[in-house]
Amino acid sequence: MIPVCEPLLDDQARANVAEAVATGWISSDGRFIAAFERNWAAYCGVEHGVAVCNGTAALAVALRALRLEPGSEVVLPSLTIISCVLAVLDAGCVPVLVDCEPDTWCMDVARVAARIGPRTRAVMPVHLFGHPVDMAPLSALAERHGLAIVEDAAQAHGAEYQGRRVGGLGTLGCFSFYANKIVTTGEGGMVVTADPVLAERMRDLRNLCFRRDRRFLHTEIGHNYRMTNLQAAIGVAQVDRIEDHLARKRRIAALYTERLRDVAGLALPVERPNTRNVHWMYAVVLDDGVPFDAAAFAALLRERGVDSRPFFLGMHEQPVFHDRGLFVGERHPVTERLARRGLYLPSGLGLTEAQIDTVCAVVREIV
């Protein structure tokens, strides 16, 4: 079976972990935490990084840091992972959904203005599968309405928009370092920001909100969202190699596109002008004329030894939110179509050209 994705660690990562173990600094203190925060924030073009235990925690502390009033609205795409909506609810806010673009699969910024109301306080663009959201009009809209921008850049490490890296384009930028991400720490996450006040608040929120003047006195609810020094030790080495990883991802995408561009019935990833798509995953969408959906396609691929993963099911179609009275009766047709007709092919950094050839031959046979 050709897997979808697998982590790729080098000797430096192993040496860093060995150092952390040898020195005894394995928990949430140790030199690698600060180094990872500093290096990743600098890579994203901002001053401050706050490492946490995973990407969901990153979204949660970012929204909590903004001190939004209960009932404030946050606009975000329906085509995303459930973590985004969970973070909004955790902050006591109301999620408001918009549809996505049919080609980039990212938030359709043209639809955001119509969803802004008197209680809107923030917008959450999600840079999906490695392609940036169209940030210039979104930033202008946010400035006009006084909205914070919380970027979910979990799938787009190193992606660029108009020469700037995602995560550093808004008020706060959130990352996941899960095992299948371009930079991985196994589990882990980080929020980056140019705002030192927000950074300090997030450091408190990730650490149970211990009072600085008296450790076990608490005047606000926090969580234990700390990253370990062991995870950060891996992350430091990963940041050093990120450009190699990105070059490999883009090469894999180029090979797929070269071999699949003439397959009728298959829509391939795009790269808009003035952007850098890092192709975290190589995703494809079946045209409506293909007589089977993505679930059937995935089953046929698996029968032939090729693993795949589906697109997200839109947040407006999730029963758990309908049970809470959210998104009932909403329709986001582009999201619905992509959820039923999109999947991504094996895209791991260790993928060989021979494996890509095999995958493409199987796709051709099926489609």
Image (tube, helix red, strand yellow):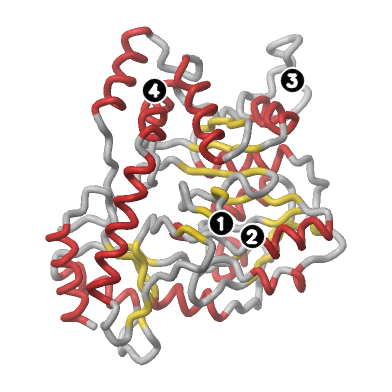
Q: Is residue 229 above or below residue 135?
A: above
Please tell me which of labels 4 and 1 falls first in the chain. 1
Secondary structure, mark 1, is strand
Q: Amino acid at mark 3?
A: His
x then y, percent, for residue 313: 48, 68
* Label 2–label 1 contact, CB within 8 A: yes
Residue holding disc 4 = 230
1 and 3 marks in contact (CB < 8 Å): no
Q: Quadrant of residue 47?
A: top right
Q: Residues within 10 Å of mark 3 (few under 14, many from 20)?
A: few
Q: State the SS at label 2.
A: helix
- The residue identified by callout 2 is 135
Comes first in the chain, label 2 or label 4: 2
Disc 2 versus disc 3: nearer the observer: 2
Of the image marks 2 and 3, the number of the one nearer the N terminus: 2
Q: Amino acid at mark 4?
A: Leu
Residue in the picture at 74% in, 54% down: 122
Q: How many numbered marks appear?
A: 4
Which mark is first along the chain, 1 or 2? 2
Quarter the C terminus occupies: bottom left
**Disc number lying in front (1 or 3):** 1
Name the residue located 67 percent from the left edge and 49 percent from the top edge. Answer: 170
The answer to whether 188 appears left or right of 198 in the picture is left
Which residue appears farthest toward the right when viewing the image?
118
Neighbours of disc 4 within 10 Å: few (<14), some (14-19), many (20+): many
Q: What numbered label is drawn on residue 161?
A: 1
Q: Position of residue 220 (x, y in %)?
A: 75, 27
Labelled pair 4, 1 in contact (Cβ < 8 Å): no
C-alpha separation, residue under disc 2 versus residue under disc 3? 38 Å
